[in-house]
Image (cartoon, rainbow, N blue to C red):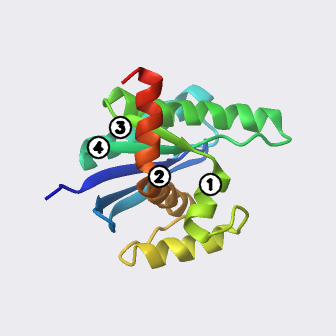
Amino acid sequence: MTLPIRILGIDPGLRRTGWGVIDVDASRLIFVACGSVATDESAAIAERLLAIHAGLSRVVDQHDPAESAVEATFVNKDAAATLKLGQARGIALLVPAQAGLRVAEYAPNLVKKTIVGAGHCEKAQIRMMVGMLLPKADPQSEDAADALAIAICHAHHRSSAVVTVGARLGL
């Protein structure tokens, strides 16, 4: 008999960083919690990053995940926006790493393909499929729904992600 694995999914963003926690028990996905960490858009970037760090640290402390997954950054035409997203993503990678968790990274298209079956879809489709896969989940924002999708993606791909991380570490 194996114990459930608790996974934290993180959808990084400077305005709102979504988070979602699920348990994986064999092939069963179980909703635990979700939400988002919002920052004050008028605050300095350092204060906003600190707010994301504090919020995600509370989530890790409260839910005690065993593994984590973060959506990889996509590059858009606005270099400044990409840089800010990268800074928020750095915090999203740092917090679980500080807690001693492995951090897997998934491209947005892989998350969409895993959840919806197509690499290009609308946010509403992701939210609908998250609701079907986790019927007890009721994410209050797209960021929280996306974070749950990232956690689900990791649940489906975690074996290969663990092997990849282990290979990088020489295990």
Residue 101: give x, y in percent of width and height.
34, 34
Q: Nearer the viewer, mark 4 or mark 1?
A: 1
Residue 110 is marked as 1
Q: Is mark 2 on a helix, strand or loop?
A: helix
- Marks 4 and 3, the one that precedes in the sequence: 3
**Which quadrant is the C terminus positioned in?**
top left
Q: Is mark 3 on a helix, strand or loop?
A: helix
For mark 2, does the 10 Å Cα neighbourhood hold few (<14), some (14 to 19), or many (20 or more) residues?
some
Mark 4: amino acid: Ala
- Marks 4 and 1, the one that precedes in the sequence: 4
Residue furthest to the left in view is: 1
Residue 56: give x, y in percent of width and height.
40, 41
Query: Residue 60: which quarter of the image?
Result: top left
Residue 69: give x, y in percent of width and height.
46, 45
Q: Is residue 57 toward the left or the right of residue 113 in the image?
A: left
- Marks 4 and 2, the one that precedes in the sequence: 4
> Is residue 72 visible to us here?
yes
Residue placed under numbered mark 4 in the picture: 66
Residue placed under numbered mark 3 in the picture: 57
Name the residue rendered at 70%, 69% in the picture: 122
Q: Is residue 64 toward the left or the right of residue 37 in the image?
A: left
**Badge 1 vs badge 3, beta-carbon distance below 8 Å:** no
Label 4, label 3: how many angstroms apart (C-alpha)? Answer: 14 Å
**Badge 2 vs badge 1, beta-carbon distance below 8 Å:** yes
For mark 1, does the 10 Å Cα neighbourhood hold few (<14), some (14 to 19), or many (20 or more) residues?
some
**Which quadrant is the N terminus positioned in?**
bottom left
Name the residue rendered at 63%, 62% in the picture: 113
Label 3, label 2: how many angstroms apart (C-alpha)? Answer: 25 Å
- Marks 1 and 3, the one that precedes in the sequence: 3
> Is residue 55 visible to us here?
no
Residue placed under numbered mark 2 in the picture: 157
